[in-house]
């Protein structure tokens, strides 16, 4: 929660530093350009991901990985639409397939750990 409150402040500081280093017009062009790029990538990769989900459903395959890809693409595209260098870097990393794969694996492991922890707590509570 605190990180969500600090993110805009950090982004603002980075914008100010970038404006001093490369100039205000250039910084604004980068911010607008990454927003446009985010919209284009979100549309292109998002449509492809939706088609993959539909193909897997039509083939009778549970589209778990394809749905997770779609979710990652949505998040990555939205991060690129937000102004800021940190959100842009995160968005590009999520949209780039090799780093998206790493992120998906970390996300899945995190969810599995939480489910295992919850199951242990449930088992402990059921014995009392």
Image (spheres, rainbow, N blue to C red):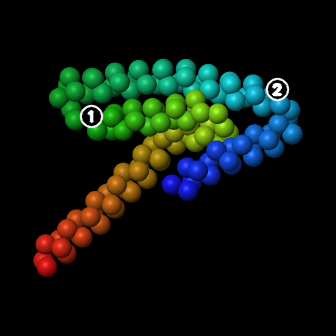
Q: Residues within 10 Å of mark 1 (few under 14, many from 20)?
A: some
Q: Nearer the viewer, residue 16 or 96?
A: 16
Pinpoint residue 8: horizontal percent, then vertical percent.
Answer: 64, 44
> Which element type, helix, strand or loop, lies under badge 2?
helix
Lower sequence index among marks 1 and 2: 2
Q: Nearer the viewer, residue 55 or 122?
A: 122
Report if the CB atoms under discs 1 and 2 are less than 8 Å apart: no
Q: In the picture, which quadrant includes the C terminus?
A: bottom left
Judged from this view, the residue extending furthest toward the left is 127
Closer to the eye: label 1 or 2: 2
Pinpoint residue 46: horizontal percent, then vertical percent.
Answer: 43, 25
Residue at the spot of label 1: 63
Pinpoint residue 4: horizontal percent, then vertical percent.
Answer: 55, 49
Residue sitting at x 30%, y 27%: 53
39 in relation to 27, above or below: above
Residue at the spot of label 2: 25
How many discs appear? 2
118 in relation to 57, above or below: below
Q: Is residue 98 visible?
A: no
Residue sitting at x 31%, y 57%: 112
Residue sitting at x 62%, y 26%: 35
Pinpoint residue 13: horizontal percent, then vertical percent.
Answer: 75, 46
Q: CA distance from mark 1 to mark 2?
A: 44 Å
Residue sitting at x 44%, y 37%: 72
């Amino acid at each position: 929660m605190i990180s969500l409150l600090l993110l805009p402040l950090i982004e603002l500081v980075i914008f100010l530093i970038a404006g001093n280093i490369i100039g205000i017009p250039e910084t604004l062009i980068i911010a607008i350009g990454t927003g446009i790029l985010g919209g284009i990538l979100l549309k292109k990769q998002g449509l492809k991901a939706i088609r993959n989900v539909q193909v897997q459903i039509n083939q009778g395959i549970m589209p778990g990985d394809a749905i997770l890809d779609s979710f990652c693409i949505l998040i990555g595209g939205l991060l690129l639409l937000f102004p800021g260098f940190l959100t842009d870097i995160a968005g590009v990393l999520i949209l780039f397939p090799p780093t998206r794969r790493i992120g998906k694996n970390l996300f899945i492991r995190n969810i599995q750990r939480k489910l295992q922890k919850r199951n242990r707590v449930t088992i402990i509570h059921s014995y009392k």
